[in-house]
Image: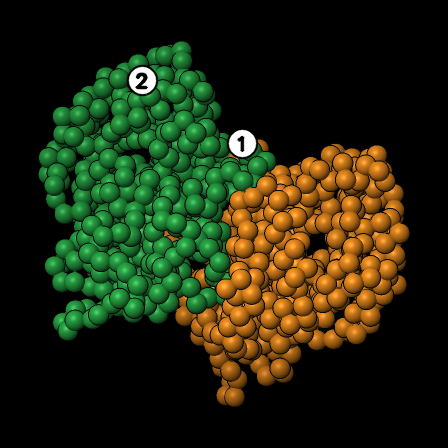
Chain colours: A orange, B green
């Protein structure tokens, strides 16, 4: 890991840098950090240094998927185009009850890691049950992860007695704190599936362990009705009343927010993860991203799990995010390519626990990717707008995480992807009853 | 072309067929038609027949891109995230005036053909100027095309005197009628850029030559204002008053339609091409696709040109189409994967002049593609929903058009794609002033 690698002959883009690129540059990585960035004319190779030729490809920060349920790759395409409650109650919940096991979480999270790495994601924030197994899969894949153990007030996979849910999460944090590229965390499922007591205990655990707290917040219009017996105001105001909102709380979806909710989030410093494709496919609604950004709320980007998207390609997610808000507001000038790239790189990378990735500059974590620009759909390549509006995950040729070469020339080097696909296909045969 | 090719070891999907696939089948192509489809157990190879091993890949109909301005690949990413009128008047119109030439249309349409073929499109309906050059590029690429010469009442590339616009279109049709895989056609730019006289003459030309008539219709909210000096009703009612609507008229975009407009289109038998990503990015609005389908109006799918999308990947377009209508209507059960696949295959293929493609069955045109299913993001593969919600253009491994192998193992066999990209890059250097 302390061997220096230099990527040469690269076009270099770092979000936040002025419009232009370094047209022909190099980037050196060592000890998990970027140690040099410059123009090729100033590069003098030393013997015994490892060189990787980008051949005119574009070097950019790796993408940050700020919300996923990785193990749900098993349910990709199992049930689509259904009314929300039919989908949840007749397909997803029963499938989770029957098929979620430690083995399933391990292999299906590993499959998700393969898909994410192959589409340029270098950090994932995951939220599921048996999160121990997901964390193991992530470590073996080489991806950086914020791994959040799920907390819910129903019997759940690995937590048959909900009274144990905080203890299970505490044990998970204890075992994974400071280990490898994993930041352990807690994911409280939602304000309507966790009691006030559970929510407060979960957040107290996060505060004492100094780890992030995630929660699905205001995803659907019906959430307010589901909360009505506990609280008359909005879900966001409810979380605030429980003292859950602070800069280490990350709220996911957050589609149904009013002005007061946005002000609360801004004043408490909590961040939002928006998952536009999931919100579109499940018809949840459109998050008020422009208002959140205007209020100064950090907005990162996530894919959500594969049961509701159905892929983990953040390039497609960036494209949908930019376009959805334009058409929703009938204004083509809002949520531009640069804003979306920021959400998917440095904004996500700077959420608490996420590792501070998101730029190509000396001293930064060495989480970067190379895009193959020699393809018809990326020709011409006038500006980085094409990364959002024309590129796809399949254009990523190489991936470096914490200085390690995780994928080179579209081959994952850290684990056996074919074995992983075979293991998941075997699990899938049980799901479809074949 | 009369050599028989058989694709073996394929999963076969034909839209319209019952839910299941043929799990392990073969498809034979000869003389531009599909000559046999069956299960591998019933396949007996004869010597001197050409076999292509799909290795478990999925055979499906090629996709039909029912609206494009292919040559506008040159303007991909040149100007994004701008207010509509700034974008048009300060960037697109001046760039077209300066840079559109026969050479530009030839090379940039050829680049578009490469991008379309590589993402599984086997038929394109194109609409631009110097359409002769686009048609030449399409013939050399092997793609099937409805090539429509643009008609507009302003000086246009190749038509400096608008009084000549119908004559130029008539000459184009005369030269290309019945030639190769090209169906010539006319594209009247819009009700607000063509006079009533021009529109009627253009449609009369189409009627006498028996070719399709395309028109941008009701794309933006401001179109009605632009029409106000000629007509007080909707743009659709205006076209109807000019007797332009019949089954050989194909209206593009058609975002701003009311109930009366939809009834008019349905009763006249005119089809719609919806371009959801373009409508999202330019913030034009959301076409009433569910209402159009309910009224029985044929709705096909198009990408629009690269200046406003910015790619030509119909897989991404299918995904956006399904998701956009769900979130717009807050109903996840509408515009499902199967409906969208129908729009992008047989619905498009059966528009007038489009060649009747869109299914994998004996006697049908041999326009089919193979999808490589051995990839993490397509695992598991429970149903064809994954073609819409998880697959991308980069998953297409081989493309057959009119029985010809146009792409095999992601290599285009009909022309030199690298040369094409180099020629377009050269043109692009003039655009960005380098």
- Tag shown at residue B240: 2
Q: Is residue B104 left or right of residue B15?
A: left
C-alpha gap between disc 2 and disc 1: 28 Å
Tell me: residue B21, above or below residue A3: above
Taking depth in this image into account, of A112 and A94 the one nearest to the observer is A94
At x 81%, y 54%, the residue is A153
Callout 1 crowding tier (Cα within 10 Å): few <14, some 14–19, many ≥20: many
Taking depth in this image into account, of A433 and B372 the one nearest to the observer is A433
Q: Is residue B27 left or right of residue A177?
A: left
* Residue A299 horizontal/vertical position (percent): 67, 49
Tell me: residue A46, above or below residue B199: below
Contact, mark 2 vs mark 1 (Cβ under 8 Å): no
Report the residue marked by disc 1: A330
Q: Is residue A434 visible?
A: yes
| Label 1 SS | loop
* Residue A43 horizontal/vertical position (percent): 49, 75
At x 20%, y 64%, the residue is B5
Quadrant location of the N terminus of chain A in the rendered image: bottom right
At x 42%, y 17%, the residue is B260
Mark 1 falls within which chain? A
Tell me: residue B225, above or below residue A253: above
At x 38%, y 57%, the residue is B21
Mark 2 falls within which chain? B
Camera-near label (2 vs 1) is 2
């Amino acid at each position: 890991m302390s061997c220096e690698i230099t990527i040469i002959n690269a076009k270099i883009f770092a979000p936040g840098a002025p419009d232009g690129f370094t047209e022909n540059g190099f980037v050196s990585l060592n000890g998990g950090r970027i140690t040099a960035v410059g123009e090729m004319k100033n590069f003098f190779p030393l013997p015994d240094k490892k060189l990787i030729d980008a051949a005119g490809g574009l070097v950019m920060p790796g993408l940050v998927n700020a919300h996923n349920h990785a193990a749900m790759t098993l349910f990709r395409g199992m049930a689509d185009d259904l009314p929300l409650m039919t989908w949840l109650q007749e397909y997803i919940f029963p499938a989770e009850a029957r098929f979620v096991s430690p083995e399933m979480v391990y292999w299906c999270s590993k499959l998700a890691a393969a898909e994410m790495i192959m589409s340029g994601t270098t950090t994932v924030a995951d939220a599921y049950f048996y999160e121990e197994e997901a964390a193991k899969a992530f470590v073996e894949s080489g991806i950086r992860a914020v791994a959040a153990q799920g907390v819910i007030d129903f019997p759940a996979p690995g937590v048959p007695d909900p009274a144990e849910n905080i203890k299970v999460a505490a044990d998970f944090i204890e075992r994974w704190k400071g280990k490898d590229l994993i930041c352990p965390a807690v994911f409280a499922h939602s304000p309507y599936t966790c009691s006030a007591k559970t929510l407060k205990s979960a957040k107290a655990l996060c505060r004492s362990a100094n780890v992030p707290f995630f929660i699905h917040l205001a995803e659907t219009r019906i959430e307010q009705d589901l909360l009505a017996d506990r609280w008359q105001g909005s879900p966001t105001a409810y979380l605030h009343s429980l003292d859950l909102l602070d800069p280490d709380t990350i709220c996911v979806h957050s589609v149904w927010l009013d002005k007061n909710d946005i002000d609360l989030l801004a004043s408490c410093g909590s961040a939002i993860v928006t998952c536009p494709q999931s919100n579109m496919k499940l018809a949840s609604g459109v998050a008020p991203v422009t208002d959140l950004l205007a209020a100064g709320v950090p907005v990162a980007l996530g894919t959500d799990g594969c049961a509701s998207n159905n892929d983990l390609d953040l390039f497609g997610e960036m494209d949908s995010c930019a376009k959805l808000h334009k058409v929703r507001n009938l204004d083509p000038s809002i949520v531009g390519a640069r804003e979306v790239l920021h959400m998917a790189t440095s904004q996500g990378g700077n959420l608490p626990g996420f590792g501070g990735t998101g730029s190509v500059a000396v001293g930064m974590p060495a989480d970067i990717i190379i895009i193959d620009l020699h393809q018809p759909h990326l020709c011409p390549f006038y500006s980085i707008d094409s990364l959002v509006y024309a590129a796809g995950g399949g254009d990523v040729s190489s991936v470096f995480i914490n200085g390690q070469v995780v994928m080179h020339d579209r081959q994952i080097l850290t684990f056996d992807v074919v074995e992983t696909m075979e293991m998941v296909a075997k699990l899938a045969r049980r799901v479809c009853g074949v």
